Amino acid sequence: MEHKLPELPYAYDALEPYIDAKTMEIHHTKHHQGYITKYVNALEGEEALLNKDVEEVLRDLSSVPESKRAAIINNGGGYFNHRLFWTILGPSKTMPSGDLLEAIKKEFDSFDNFKDVFSNAAATRFGSGWAWLVVADDGSLKVLSTANQDAPFSEGTPILALDVWEHAYYLNYQNRRPDYIKSFWQVVNWDKVQEYYNNAL
């Protein structure tokens, strides 16, 4: 299969003032493209793996030769994580509803409390990494964070992601990661998160 940079479903400036156009453009065309390129290069000669979607490969790392595994975790993670991240962002402010909102309330008592738990996971991730909302194997929701570009598949299926690498926010927010996290809530596409939730179940 062809591994190429996915087009964004909105313009680079669509998320302003919360995420600026320059950051989006660099993040998408330089960082995300870089992970995809390095992922493909790392799997040179592994046609069976190259013909699979990156998610399938990351979910079965035992199928990856041990000598290539670290490169696939890092670059395949960067490939997949960003692909998900772009889709759960959007210019129209939405809110969770229906069964997803009920599941959030069941697990975290309230939507506001969930936001606090998720924001804390993002804010306290030391160094570079991601915060996640995942659907565990038993159908419950779980908030966690991972280091670097590690994908969270060992914990469940991701349905919401926040990139807290400095490249995701430094042009606009410098070292103010909490301000970036606060802005993130203004651009979450909850309709897409709901879709991922339904698929995960």
Image (spheres, rainbow, N blue to C red):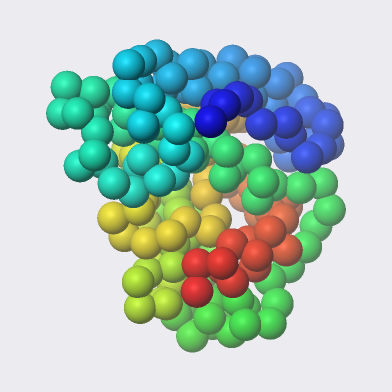
Residue 37 vertical position relative to residue 61 in the rendered view, above or below: above
196 and 188: which one is in front? 196
Q: Whole-percent x and y of residue 79? A: 49, 31
Q: Whole-percent x and y of residue 106? A: 49, 85
For the question of whether residue 148 can be seen, the reply is: no
Left or right of 66? Residue 42 is: right
To which quarter of the image does residue 8 belong? top right
Left or right of 182? Residue 55 is: left
Q: How many marks?
A: 0
Which residue sits furthest left? 66
Residue at screen point 84% across, 53% down: 92
Left or right of 116? Residue 138 is: left
Residue at screen point 47% across, 56% down: 158
168 and 182: which one is in front? 168
To which quarter of the image does residue 196 belong? bottom right
Residue 155 vertical position relative to residue 33 in the rendered view, above or below: below
Residue at screen point 68% across, 71% down: 96
Left or right of 104? Residue 42 is: left
112 and 148: which one is in front? 148
Q: Whole-percent x and y of residue 76? A: 40, 31
For the question of whether residue 133 can be seen, the reply is: yes
Q: Whole-percent x and y of residue 67? A: 17, 22
